[in-house]
Amino acid sequence: MNGSIRLLLAGALAAAAPAAAQDTIPTPAPVDVPQLEPAALTLAGAECQGVARYLNVRSASGAQLSPDGRELLYLTSTTGMPQLWVAPVRGEGPAAARQVTFGANRVQFARWSPDGRWIAYGTDRGGNERTQFFLLSPDGTRERELTPSDEHFRDFAGWSPRGSRIAYVSTERNGRDFDLYLLDLAADGRPAGPARMVLRGAGNLQVEAWRPDGEAMVLSQGRGEADNDLMLLDLRTQKLDTLFAPAQMSSYRSIQWTPDGQGFFVATNHERDFAGLAHYHLPDRQLHWMQQPRWDVEQVALSPDGKFLAYTVNEGGFSRLVIRDLPGQRDLPVASLPGGVVGSLEWAEAAPRLAIGVSGPGTPGDVWVYDAAAQTLARATESTLAGLDPTGFVTPRPVQFPSFDGETIHGLLYSPRAAAGARPPVVMMLHGGPTSQARPGFDPVKQYLLARGYAVLDLNFRGSTGYGQRFTQLDNKRLRPNAVRDMQAAVEWLRALPGVDGNRVAAMGGSYGGYMTYAAVAQLPEFFRAGVPFVGVANWISGLEDASPSLKNSDRIEYGNIDDAADREFFRQISPLSYAERIRSPLMVVHGANDPRVPVAEADQIVRAVRRRSGDVEYLRFPDEGHGIAKLANRVTAYQRIARFLDRVLEHQAPVCTQ
């Protein structure tokens, strides 16, 4: 018998073990470690395709132009894990891109030095989010280690304007609080000495932006998951000046200093429901509004010479880009970008060129470069679609409906092209956060499910961002159960739609969406036929006690105080584990053993509880993953298993040529 066939058969037999025998399986068990499956590929151009083609669709992310604007740095997963690539901007030389990192672990970020001589980048190990920093020459031939590989959490905070040092925040002092460190660099890129702490932090301290002279920086102190206070740290005197710490929590993001260092542009919802574009003038400590649209202003990018200001507006999940000529007081014409989400805006340090990262239903994630002087837009990357026809991709339509209390709930509804009058089952996607938003960026899993004949509702339950500060705070603390009731309202709305089968609905989500998926099957068993939770919290008491430091510092505001007896009882009441005896719908639980945010013990607990009751549960416990499934081989295995699971539990006849 062929080895891959034996492997598939063994996995299928384990997954199909009688429910009555599941209570005899210890948790975790060897059978919970997934055996890798071969990728199922059909010929390019065939009417139906396996998930491997969809997962091989590439994207370019984290794009940044070199200081002279002639080269583009970005991340892509051509080798199966995100690695760094450098490519000349169109018209600046040969078009061939070159890969410059080749490690076994994912690259998490990359930043050009101000003089273009080095690239700072970071990696973790097996998804554990303990980031180690390196320097790399742009040609990839010289590399320097800046920080050790250890168990501390570190977040890169940027280059100084002159490029002689880097900043970062780290928990290395006590394992809980983020402190600010500076690391001076020698001319050859090596550390000039040990990093020095310049500010002892409390909680989730982050750096927003260096002042142009390099002698001060704007710091952010997290207040919950969506909001923050702003402070100005003078690096010469160590004086810390609070700029914004309002009684009503607010968000201050995308800080962009003006060249004179007298103030900065900021996207903020200060004393507003939606975030607008403002300028803060330091001498008079006044916030001056420039744009106050009825949607959130998100990203702001000022050209280093201060002449051009780019920003995006989130209009129901879709991005609208504006580029403003500040001296001329006019908006510049920008040729049409693909519809979807603008994920990044980065000006070159010494050229009027702007890198724009876009992802949409028909665009897997690519970069365009706008030349403000010439007022031209050119595509800089063109990621492979792995042989898929983009005309088959589905664009969602925004939908809304009332919840139990009359609150309007939003979402994106994707309808399969192959429905042909049939009423397809529905996969309800539940985003993480909860301070996040379902948006129309490219998602290979959604497009794969659509090709298999499923409809997808990407739900923005209360607590989501994008619909104003009031809506985002509707699930805080004791209001959290109301978001679960939004899922019930969503199913009731689906059942009234003529184009889908609202009686065959599965929940699927990751991180906070994993918790919502557990809650869907545990607390709303009559509404959900199945659940596929990724890296979700099953027990809020252990989940909050064991969370990573960056999450613990915001959890107290978002959820409550785990040390308070009343709050602790509330956490028990809303934990899906408390309702495990009500779970009668099949579960496919997916978790990484190295997860630092939601420890894998969360999945172990609920799988163990379901098995004790002889419930229908399949468990994919990946030993080499963290908070999500990043490795291509693991992703292929997971989604091939998930597709078969959904077909079984939703009684769906998908095309037989796909896996």
Image (cartoon, rainbow, N blue to C red):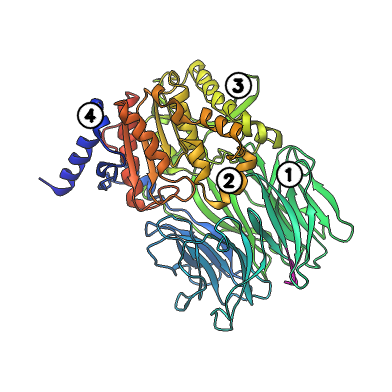
> Which of these two is toward me, 557 or 257?
557
Q: Is residue 418 magenta?
A: no
Q: Residue furthest front?
A: 565
Please state which amino acid type lies under the numbered disc 1. Answer: Ser
Residue 151 vertical placement versus 536 (above, below): below
Q: Which residue is mark 1?
A: 250
Checking the image for residue 341, the label placed there is 2
Query: Disc 3 to disc 1, how far (Cα)?
Result: 26 Å
**Residue 324 in sight:** no
Determine whether label 4 and label 2 are within 8 Å by CB.
no
> Which of these two is toward me, 642 or 220?
220
Residue at 44% over, 70% down: 100
Q: Is residue 213 magenta?
A: yes
Q: Is residue 82 left or right of residue 375?
A: left
Query: Disc 1 to disc 2, how far (Cα)?
Result: 23 Å
Q: Circle 1: is it few (<14), some (14-19), or many (20+) Cα within 10 Å?
A: many
Which mark sits nearer the N-terminus, 3 or 1?
1
**Where is residue 659 shown, x and y percent of the image?**
29, 38
Residue 377 vertical placement versus 223 (above, below): below
Checking the image for residue 21, the label placed there is 4
Please state which amino acid type lies under the numbered disc 3. Answer: Ser
Which mark sits nearer the N-terminus, 4 or 2?
4
